Structure formats: structure tokens, C-alpha cells
Image (spheres, rainbow, N blue to C red):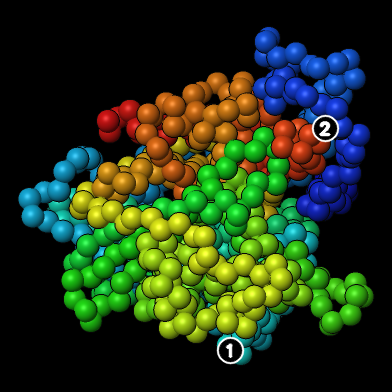
């Protein structure tokens, strides 16, 4: 009885922490002229010696923020989180860390043993594309939890597009081969917030026979990171019921609805099988364009990749559709902030409809132009969509702005290597989905193609290299450890004899010709770990581009859902970060959703190990 009472108390605390809000204000931050010591300093008190505050008041404010963040981390992680971790019993799914043999953990693909620098003879690219719905068969009858911000928000209806057609949640897949004989490489992109590594392995298990029959050497699963899909991480569906079940029973219940997991696995397999059947030879082209007006970083320190990268596969056969692979860092989440809207100003219940956000509408433009399309999430960090240009002050709700943003991104992708005359013709041929002819000339309306630079598409030589590495990562964030050990989250969780918890994650390194070099990250990586700058001070490793000497880009949420990946010197679970652009403090709660303070060091250390071994 005592065990159950303690568990009930802990569950109440846990539920409170599932909906964290930060009320720290810094409205009087005016007057800051130097905060290098703040952004460079660790919460343990490591200060950059050459950084000096402008005046005594500034110094007091910097010290106050550092103390606040230290106390916040201590109270949330050291006190409340640790109490939850200690009080709540492990579910029967928790495994023993010391006896777990990572080499025997099934459904890991290491990639290629040998990297090449040049095409093998006269070989050419081959690529296939496929997609399938991941909506459960009983969607529309059974209600599912919305994977957004509030738990227990259930719905069974998709948004409709402007043609009256229901949106869908998809698995999109491409299979690539450079003709070298080293095997096929699979990329799957799911319309979901994130997919734990243990669930990624379920997809690979379903593809095991297909992979063996088709010489597939690497299977990589990413998520578009929509915040308006079905809960794919468990914490929004029934956390209290899951914890109670797993306290009282060894028959483990998981947070993510098993019907949804099954539909994702089935849809992913169908998409890959369709892509294999679609394999054809052709040429591959690379281009990139700066879209700084369409993305912005909401939290200091401000470091983000504002480029959108495109790979365009053009088949030799005119009977085959070309395929565009696009990646850039951006949270597709604006529709998830919306509340129900009946046209009035009344506050109504949280929106229960599901949506694929802008991804669905970018694909509609692509399909109208005759292209297949897949979006792979980029260096997402705390970067979100800037919808000003696409919304143009029009009176639109959040979902409508997601529609317009998706269309505009699609047009930019299609038109980035065209001149203005060809862009105008393409805009008309695809149905003028932004209403340029309707709104052109209206005050403050911006036409998507006016002022857009033309970039040259470069042919990509048929060289495809990929290597993955799996490893243990310690879960230092006691909130995440609690969600894992109780099986609310789907992560594989292991426990050592000292009471520490671990999970298994992966990183990878990808090269596509000489044009695209990619760090495949399991989390949401803060940009300063790629670029450096003030935000990287205090990080024990060199920034990625400095260490590698390459213009590497990041594809985030690949093969895991590890949460935010921050510089441990700036790690804060709920506190303040100084924004050099505004001269004010930003509320910061992102690292509540992370494996912990040193996760970034762990991930990037293993990435550097791959990089060093293949170079």
C-alpha cells in the first residue's frame, strides 16, 4: 500500500511536469552592451576571462540569470525529477545495463564498410520513390491523442485542404544507389513529431527480408516533426493510465498507441517496397538557396542555418516522375498553437483536428508540377517558420498560414534555378495556389518570385557514402528517465547497479557526391554546435564545421527522438537565455525535453569517431 501511495504522489508531480510553463520575465534587460560571459559560461561557474560586463547593473543581471538557471536545474532535475525517478517503480520493460550486449541488439544497419571518392567507372545514379499513409485503419472511428502540447487532447478528424480533400499523415521513402555495388540506402520520412530508436528498429525488423533481398545496407528513419499529428512519443496519450498499469502489472503498457505504431511500421514498409519497385536510372542535381525570411530562431544564442537544400533526381526515362528531396531546419508547428476557431474572438477548446502542417501543401505544389517529394528535417534546433511573406497580412488562422507557407516553400523549391519569366509560367501552370493574380498589387503583399535570386543547379557525381554508429547514452534528465523507466515513452531503457538509466541511440555520416556532407543527428541540435560562435563557448568539443573542415549540414531527428541537443555550458531546463539581437532575455524551457546536459558531447564525440575513421 505504501508503494502505491508513493506512486500516486509521484504521478501527480509527473503530470504537472508534462505541461511545463516558464514565468520568468526580463522586461528590464535594457542597457546590456556585453553578455559574452553569460552565453559563454557554464552553470557551474566557468567564466570567459576576457569578457567584462559594461556596468555593475549588467553584471548583477548576468549573475542573477546564472544563479536562476543553476537553481532551476537543481530544483527540476536534482530535486523533483530525482524524487520521481526514485519513487516510481520501473516497468517490467527496463533491462539490465551491465548484461545488455549492444552488439546483439537487432536491427541496426552500420552502412558501408568502404567510402569512395569517385564514381566507379561509368556507373550512374538510381533512385526510387514511394509513399503510404500511416493513419490507423480505424482512424475516424477511434480517437487518437494529438502529439502537441497538452496531453489528453483526442480527435479523429484530419483538416481538409482548400479542395475539400482530407489531409493525410504519410511515410515517404527514397531508395538511392550510386551503382558502385556497395548497396542500396533507404531514407524514410514520417509525418510525426519523433520516433524513438526502439520504434525505428521495429520498422527495420519489418523490412528485414526486403533488405536482404535487395542489398539494403542502411535504413534511416526521420520525422518531419509536425506538432499536429498523432502522438508518436507517448506522453500525450494516457501517461497516468500507463504508469498505473505498469506499477500494478508486469504486462507492460506503452505510451504510444500500439495501433499507431503498427500503422507506421506497415506504412513505412509499403513506402519502401514502392520505392524499390520505382527504381530507375538518372541524373542528380544539387542546389541551395537562402530562405532567411522564412525561418527564425526563437531562443538565444541565435545560430541557425538559413539555407534550404535541394536534391533533384531526373530519370533518363520520360515515363518516370522526377523526385525532389528537400531539407532545411524548421519546426512545422504553427497550426499546433491554434485553438478551435468559430470566427469569433471567444477562447474555445484546443484544436482537436490533425494536420500534416506545411508539408502536405508543399507536396501539393510539387505534385502539380509533376514531381515526387520528400522533406527531411534539417538543423531544427529552436528554429520555426517565418510566415510573414506567405501570409502577407491576410486575415488567416494558423492552419491557413501553414497552407500558404507550404505552398510558398514549394514554389521556391521548384523555382530556385529558374528565371522570373519561367517562374511566372510555372506559377500559373500549377494553379497559382498563393493567389498572386488575386492579391498582386495589394498593399504589403509580396509576390514569392520577385527578388528571389536564381541559383545554379550542380550535377552530382554518383558517389554515395554512409556510415552509422550505435551507442549507449546516459539519461541525465531525470524527467525523461522517469518517462522512460515507466514506459510512458517508447525508448529502450536500461538500468545499472548504481541506479543510473541509459538508452541506445545512433548517429551517422552521409556523403552525396561532393555536394552534400551530412551529420545525421538523433535530436534537435542547437546551431552553435555546428557553426561555433558565442553560444559554443564552454563546449568541450570543437564546432562541427571547424573540426571537420567541411561545410557539413545537419539532418536532425534521424533514427531517434533524443530531444534538444545543447551546449552543456548553456544547458538549462527552465530559465533564461540572453538574446544579443534584441538585448533582452528569452524564456528557455527546451532542455526539459532532452536526454541531458552532456548528450550533445556524447553524440558529437561518436560522430567525430565515424568521421575520423572514414577519412
Give the residue at the far top of this rendering: 49
C-alpha separation, residue under disc 2 versus residue under disc 1: 49 Å
Residue at 75% over, 64% down: 337
Q: Position of residue 532 (x, y in %)?
A: 54, 29
Give the residue at the far bottom of this rendering: 164
Q: Position of residue 390 (x, y in %)?
A: 63, 67
Identify the residue under disc 2.
72
From the viewer's side, name the closer residue of 458 and 592.
458
Q: Which mark is residue 123?
A: none
309 vs 535: above or below: below
> In the image, is 355 to the left or to the right of 361?
right
Q: Secondary structure at mark 2?
A: helix
Residue at 64% over, 79% down: 439
Q: Which mark is residue 163?
A: 1
Q: Position of residue 158 (x, y in %)?
A: 64, 80
Instruction: Work out whether residue 111 can be spotted.
Output: no
Residue at 58% over, 82% down: 437
Disc 1 residue crowd, few under 14, some 14–19, many 20+, Cα 10 Å:
few
Q: Position of residue 458 (x, y in %)?
A: 28, 53
From the viewer's side, name the closer residue of 521 and 561.
521
255 vs 2: above or below: below
Q: Quadrant of residue 488?
A: bottom right
Quick check: marks 2 and 1 in contact, CB under 8 Å?
A: no
From the viewer's side, name the closer residue of 109 and 403.
403
Mark nearest the camera among 2 and 1 is 1
Instruction: Work out whether residue 328 can be spotted.
Output: yes
Q: Quadrant of residue 252?
A: bottom right
Q: Secondary structure at mark 1?
A: loop
Closer to the chain start, of discs 2 and 1, is: 2
> In the image, is 368 to the left or to the right of 142?
left
Residue at 23% over, 81% down: 319
Amino acid at each position: 500500500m505504501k508503494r502505491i501511495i508513493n506512486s500516486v504522489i509521484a504521478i501527480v508531480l509527473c503530470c504537472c511536469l508534462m505541461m511545463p510553463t516558464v514565468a520568468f520575465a526580463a522586461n528590464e534587460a535594457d542597457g546590456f552592451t556585453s553578455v559574452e560571459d553569460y552565453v559563454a559560461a557554464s552553470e557551474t561557474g566557468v567564466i570567459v576571462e576576457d569578457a567584462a560586463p559594461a556596468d555593475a547593473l549588467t553584471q548583477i543581471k548576468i549573475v542573477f540569470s546564472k544563479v536562476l538557471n543553476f537553481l532551476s536545474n537543481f530544483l527540476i532535475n536534482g530535486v523533483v525529477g530525482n524524487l520521481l525517478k526514485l519513487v516510481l517503480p520501473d516497468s517490467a520493460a527496463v533491462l539490465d545495463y551491465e548484461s545488455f550486449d549492444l552488439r546483439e541488439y537487432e536491427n541496426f544497419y552500420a552502412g558501408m564498410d568502404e567510402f569512395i571518392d569517385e564514381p566507379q567507372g561509368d556507373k550512374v545514379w538510381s533512385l526510387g520513390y514511394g509513399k503510404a499513409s500511416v493513419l490507423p485503419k480505424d482512424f475516424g472511428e477511434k480517437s487518437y491523442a494529438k502529439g502537441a502540447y497538452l496531453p489528453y487532447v483526442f480527435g479523429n478528424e484530419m483538416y481538409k485542404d482548400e479542395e475539400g480533400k482530407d489531409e493525410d499523415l504519410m511515410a515517404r521513402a527514397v531508395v538511392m544507389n550510386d551503382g558502385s555495388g556497395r548497396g542500396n540506402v533507404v531514407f524514410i520520412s514520417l509525418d510525426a513529431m519523433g520516433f524513438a530508436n526502439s520504434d525505428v528498429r521495429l520498422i527495420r525488423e519489418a523490412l528485414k527480408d526486403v533488405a536482404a533481398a535487395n542489398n539494403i545496407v542502411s535504413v534511416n528513419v526521420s520525422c518531419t516533426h509536425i506538432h499536429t499529428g498523432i502522438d508518436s512519443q507517448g506522453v500525450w496519450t494516457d501517461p497516468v493510465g500507463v504508469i498505473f498499469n505498469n506499477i500494478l502489472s508486469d504486462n507492460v503498457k506503452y505510451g504510444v498507441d500500439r495501433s499507431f505504431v503498427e500503422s507506421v511500421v506497415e506504412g513505412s514498409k509499403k513506402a519502401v517496397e514502392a520505392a524499390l519497385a520505382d527504381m530507375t536510372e538518372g541524373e542528380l542535381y544539387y542546389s541551395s538557396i537562402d530562405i532567411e525570411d522564412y525561418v527564425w530562431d526563437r531562443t538565444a544564442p541565435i545560430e541557425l542555418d538559413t539555407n534550404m537544400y535541394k536534391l533533384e533526381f531526373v530519370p533518363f526515362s520520360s515515363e518516370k516522375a522526377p523526385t525532389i528531396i528537400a531539407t532545411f531546419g524548421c519546426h512545422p508547428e504553427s497550426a499546433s498553437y491554434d485553438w478551435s476557431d468559430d470566427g469569433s474572438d471567444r477562447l474555445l477548446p484546443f484544436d482537436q483536428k490533425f494536420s500534416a502542417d506545411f508539408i502536405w501543401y508543399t507536396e501539393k505544389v510539387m505534385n502539380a508540377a509533376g514531381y515526387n517529394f520528400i522533406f527531411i528535417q534539417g538543423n531544427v534546433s529552436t528554429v520555426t517558420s517565418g510566415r510573414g511573406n506567405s501570409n502577407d497580412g491576410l486575415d488567416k488562422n494558423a492552419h491557413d498560414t501553414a497552407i500558404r507557407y507550404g505552398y510558398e516553400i514549394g514554389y521556391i523549391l521548384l523555382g530556385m534555378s529558374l528565371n522570373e519569366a519561367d517562374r511566372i509560367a510555372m506559377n500559373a501552370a500549377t494553379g497559382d495556389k498563393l493567389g498572386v493574380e488575386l492579391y498582386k498589387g495589394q498593399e504589403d503583399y509580396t509576390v514569392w518570385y520577385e527578388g528571389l535570386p536564381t541559383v545554379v543547379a550542380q550535377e552530382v557525381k554518383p558517389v554515395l557514402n554512409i556510415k552509422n554508429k550505435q551507442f549507449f547514452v546516459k539519461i541525465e534528465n531525470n524527467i525523461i528517465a522517469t518517462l522512460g523507466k515507466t514506459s510512458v515513452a517508447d525508448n529502450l531503457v536500461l538500468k545499472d547497479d548504481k541506479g543510473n538509466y541509459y538508452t541506445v541511440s545512433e548517429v551517422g555520416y552521409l556523403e552525396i557526391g561532393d555536394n552534400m556532407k551530412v551529420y545525421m543527428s538523433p535530436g534537435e541540435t542547437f546551431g552553435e554546435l555546428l557553426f561555433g560562435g558565442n553560444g559554443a563557448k564552454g563546449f568541450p568539443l570543437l564546432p562541427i564545421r571547424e573540426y571537420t573542415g567541411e561545410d557539413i549540414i545537419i539532418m536532425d531527428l534521424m533514427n531517434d527522438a533524443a530531444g534538444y541537443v545543447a551546449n552543456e555550458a548553456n544547458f538549462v531546463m527552465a530559465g533564461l537565455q540572453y538574446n544579443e539581437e534584441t538585448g533582452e532575455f528569452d524564456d528557455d524551457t527546451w532542455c526539459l525535453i532532452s536526454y541531458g546536459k552532456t548528450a550533445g558531447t556524447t553524440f558529437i564525440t561518436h560522430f567525430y569517431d565515424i568521421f575520423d575513421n572514414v577519412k
